[in-house]
Amino acid sequence: MNEKISSFLKKHNFENCPDIEKTVSDLMADMKAGLSGKESDSDMIRTWADIPKNPPKNQKVIVIDAGGTNFRSCLVTFDAEGKPSISDLKKTSMPGIKCEVSKEEFFDTIAENISYLKDKADRIGFCFSYPMEITKEGDGIPTCFTKEIKASSVLGLPIGKNLKEKLESLGWSKINGISLMNDTVSALLAGAADSGGKSYSSYVGFILGTGLNAAYIQKTDPAYKIDRQIIDCECGKFSNIKSSDVDIALDKGREHQGLSLIEKASSGAYLGGVILQILRSASEEGLFSQETCKNILGIDSLGLFDADLFMHFPAKEGLLSNAAATKEDVELIHELSMAAVSRSASYAAAIIATSVLMTGEGKKSSEPVCVLCDGTTFHKTYGLKEMVSRLLLEFLTEKRGIHFELISMENDITLGTAVGALE
């Protein structure tokens, strides 16, 4: 690393390569506390569900995916061989984006969004990617809304039960169940449902996109009074990490200060802002040429897309496309940007490693733990996926003899949600 960069990062307490050993140790302690019902950052939500024993065949299911501001719906059909097909795909908006909505408005909007699928299947799988408690019946009770959704009157209500009542009032005749699940649970189920004939000892679902989270299969454990089931960790809320001057400055202007620090340091919703804050601090200290410092200080906001464009094409695109930057400026800015990406990769690897270790599996190379990874930040950010793979190989396999395999799949959330609804 360039000496200028190293000195700058050290001065501002920014760790581009946090100690994965410590992070995993702290994360595991937090997860175990959550499973025990003790105070923890990670919610460790029990789903009361396991992976299906047999793949679904000759069945149809309506799938709803509410993962942010977008609302997607479709029909998934499994043929006689269990091969899925997706049809009737539609994308609309979540209720409560522009203004606060009542309970009636919330469920009216969802019912209207899926009205075109009326009676096309008797089960509905609902991927509801907001914090919620899962009941033993597979319903979901939201505890809060994130991503700017305003629907406080829905908090504490069973989503599936209320939606079923609404649909039946509108004449729907074929609703035998509505199953709620988180997107990481859906990702895990997708990996388990389509293993490509490979033998895996367990499964993990991991998402690094706008947010950050993981799910894994917990074995039966009397110490936690828990039967084997999928656990939605909500580990993006984990906050026992070292915050740099950059993070502290950014967090002052955010909601929920001091909370969800690992997500704020790593995920796509925040990473562009982290990079910009690093570059602004560097510009204020004159790390670049005068003209480049001036240009960077004139940037009001920076999304991860533009930051990533620069990292892929530093001489042509993104941050410096309109700036008279020197070659040294380009190199310094690229290295500072990559420091933020490297930190994100370290935390992502720590979360995956902890989830794999929590399964207690992966002890045979012939039966690794399958980790289905989803999220644009994970798959598209320059160098991030490769860094995560390298860190995991060293930490899990070379040091501990734990075997894993990172996989990805098209339409994973949709297919996993369909599988979960039919179990």
Image: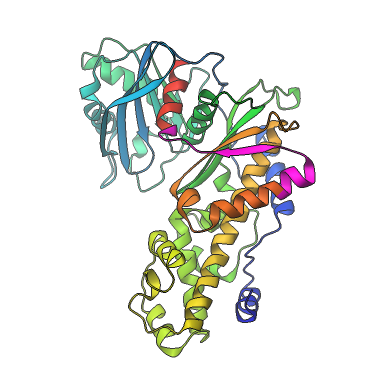
Q: Is residue 9 visible?
A: yes
User: Would you identify the image quadrant in which residue 28 lies?
Assistant: top right
Front-most of residues 112 and 14: 14
- The residue under the point 42% across, 65% down is 307
Q: Which residues are magenta?
A: 394-412
Front-most of residues 224 and 51: 51
Give yes or no for residue 372 being in the magenta stretch. Answer: no
- The residue under the point 59% across, 60% down is 343
**Residue 376 vs residue 17: left or right?**
left
Residue 15 x %, y %: 64, 65
Is residue 338 shown above or below 348?
Answer: below
- The residue under the point 52% across, 56% down is 264
Is residue 420 shown above or below 113?
Answer: above
Q: Is residue 26 visible?
A: no
Residue 314 x %, y %: 44, 71
User: Would you identify the image quadrant in which residue 81 lies?
Assistant: top left
Residue 265 x %, y %: 54, 58
- The residue under the point 67% across, 52% down is 391
Q: How many marks?
A: 0
Residue 413 x %, y %: 43, 33
Give yes or no for residue 410 being in the magenta stretch. Answer: yes
Is residue 60 shown above or below 386?
Answer: above
